[in-house]
Image (cartoon, helix red, strand yellow):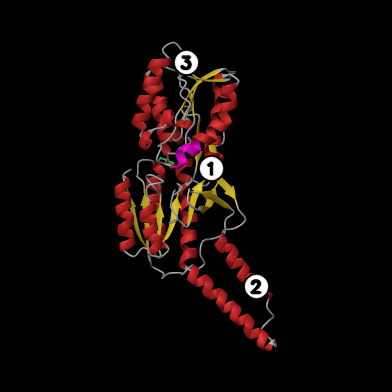
Amino acid sequence: MKKRTLLSMAMVATMMATTFAGCGESREGAGDAASDTTTATSETTEATTSEFPGFEEGATIGVSLPWLGTQNWKEAEEMFTEQLTAAGYNPIVQAADQKVTQQQQQIESMIENGAKVIVVGPVDGSQLGSVLEQAKEAGVYVIGYDRLLENTSGVDGVVQFGSVKTGELQAQALLDGLQEWKGDGPYNIELFGGGPADPNAPNFFTGAMSVLQPYIDDGTLTVVSGQTDFTECATVDWDNSKAQSRMDTLLSGFYSDKEIDGVLCPNDGIARACITACENAGQEIPVVSGLDAENESVEWVWAGKQYSTVAKPTEDLVAQTIEIIDSLQAGNGMPATDVTADNGVIDVPIYELPPVVVTKDNAKEVFANDPSRLELLN
Ligand code: BGC
């Protein structure tokens, strides 16, 4: 769980040293005192430099993505390749096809190839501990991308959209959509979660349940199948076809004489799979939440077929990551942040961006600066 801290220890150390140096007498006319200050300053510089050694421009940067099965990861692959190259680095960008061993091997070879920073979106948040510690020992910086890196000290920070917040937005959109599309309750709903190896998935679900649970308790919402635990609702590997067959089974088992009003869905692929299953079963389209603002779902939202999605722009996440890489390259260490997450071993600095819910009502505003999505809205 997230907790707020003032600043990372490294930043506190750097700030204290800077403050100390700043408190010394000015060099002009201060005689011996001036040289003391100079010493303190150069010690500070040395301490900072050895704590965060920079590296050469044009250095190799590894990017290890979990798979390319959803639009956000394909965008990340393209943007990292283009933007790291444009910034003068030598990128190695690879995807691991949902396979932990493949990802471990890819990261090992990035270390062997002299990468100075490795950016990792893990297939399984908790299975990279030893290879990331290897990276750390080799002096390689490791930045988690979009997903937390768990159970390891081999991570310097994680760039991501608020994952619990994402779940809260999905659930609130589901409630709003039920009122808007289905009128007053009570409502019949079902719940879906993402891939259980992905640390985001339980967080999305926890965030969503914190909003939905009171309405389940007071009878406004009925989860007709009774399946409300994350493990029952999870979708292994974020596989849309697995979600669609679970939805088929739920519909034939529990809804032969009932309407389904809503489905909590953790991303757009699963949302479209659930909507398709409902159409195939002759149900009216239920209110369905999503995530990623994938092109096809943006079109479905605009057409009134998928109620909502959540935008978490890849360009913002990639830009934030490259800003951190630039800071590391220049020898300035990890930028300050006041958010950390306990990954089971250390409190990891988190660089958190805000996700934004998208419905037909606000789509044009949300995508005002995203021409490729904006042109889907007509
Ligand atoms: C990402 C989502 C994506 C999902 C499946 C999650 O970790 O945050 O954007 O849809 O993985 O790829």
Q: Would you say the magenta stretch is mainly helix, strand or loop?
A: helix
The local secondary structure at tag 2 comes to helix
Residue kind at label 2, given as amino acid type: Phe
Q: Mark 1 Cα within 10 Å, few/some/many (few <14, many 20+)?
A: many
- In primary-sequence order, the first of circles 1 and 2 is 2
Residue kind at label 3, given as amino acid type: Glu
Range of residues picked out in magenta: 199-204
Residue under numbered circle 1: 355
Q: CA distance from mark 2 to mark 3?
A: 68 Å
Point out residue 202 in the picture as x, y percentages from the top left corner.
47, 37
Q: Nearer the viewer, mark 2 or mark 3?
A: 2
Residue kind at label 1, given as amino acid type: Pro
Residue under numbered circle 3: 259
The local secondary structure at tag 1 comes to loop
Point out residue 89 in the picture as x, y percentages from the top left corner.
39, 64
Q: Nearer the viewer, mark 1 or mark 2?
A: 2
Residue under numbered circle 2: 20
Report the side of 23 relative to 377 (left or right): right
- In primary-sequence order, the first of circles 1 and 3 is 3
Residue 301's disc is: none
